[in-house]
Image (tube, grey):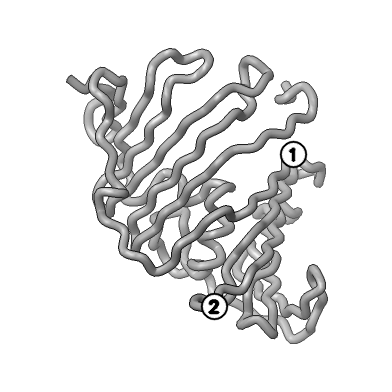
Amino acid sequence: ITFPSEEMTYTMQHTLAIAGEMMRYSYEGDRPHHEQDQLVHREYLSVYDGEVSKTFRAPAFTRPFAQGAILNEARNADVSSAEVEPLLTIYRVFRDRRTSQQGNVLPRAELGDETVTVNGRECRLLSLGTRQYWVDIERNWLIVRYVVMFGRGGMQRQVDIGYQHDPDHGWVPSEWSMLRFDRSGATRWSFDAKVTAYELNTEIPKSEFQFEFPVGDLVQELRSRPQDEVQ
């Protein structure tokens, strides 16, 4: 089964906030539905306040009720999602997000000696396990491209990142594109992201990383009970 049956292009608004190990991620917009083979409106939120991880999905096309979950994880549920990965890679490249948001230190990095041109920038190759990063020599070693390989070889995804200069914070990411491949090398999907607003080094209250489920919504308590309804 191939989904969708034909190529689809869609636009969504994503929001990400991070403070230490706390993280809040959300999106809203129309995206493909695996059963209806069309674009349907989606609203989603995930939060982690350093103690509790939760997700929330608003009512959707084939699901007339909201759905929430309290997860048995010491991290945000979306630390490894394709939409979040480029930003966490830029700012937390030496952390392994597979185990937790802070995680374990990744394998030792190896910096190549040769200089190559990537997107018009002079770069050197930094290898880190199954990941390879092309870092900009003149702009404080910014990551301008990285690829993730399948464990047995072959490219799984490629990300190209563009930056803008901030007078207070230096170079900050302004856009990126991702290509995702299958094991045969064919493109599965791609997306382009543009930063429309950002704030750095601002105080974010812990309440921003917490969420109370609306009364009456179906909530799965994955830490203990299989499910519960908020009264």
Question: Is residue 162 rendered to the left or right of residue 12?
Answer: right
Q: Residue at x 79, y 25 (%)?
A: 6
Circle number at residue 188: 1
Residue 107, placed above or below residue 177: below
- Front-lying residue, 79 or 176: 176
Q: Residue at x 69, y 68 (%)?
A: 144
Q: Which numbered mark, 1 or 2, is in the foreground of this view? A: 2
Q: Amino acid at mark 2?
A: Pro
Where's residue 23, x and y in %? 38, 52
Where's residue 55, x and y in %? 37, 36
- Front-lying residue, 170 or 228: 170
Residue 178, placed above or below residue 129: above
Residue that numbered label 2 is attached to:
167
Lower sequence index among marks 1 and 2: 2
10 Å crowding of disc 2: few (<14), some (14-19), many (20+): few
Quarter occupied by residue 142: bottom right
Quarter occupied by residue 22: bottom left
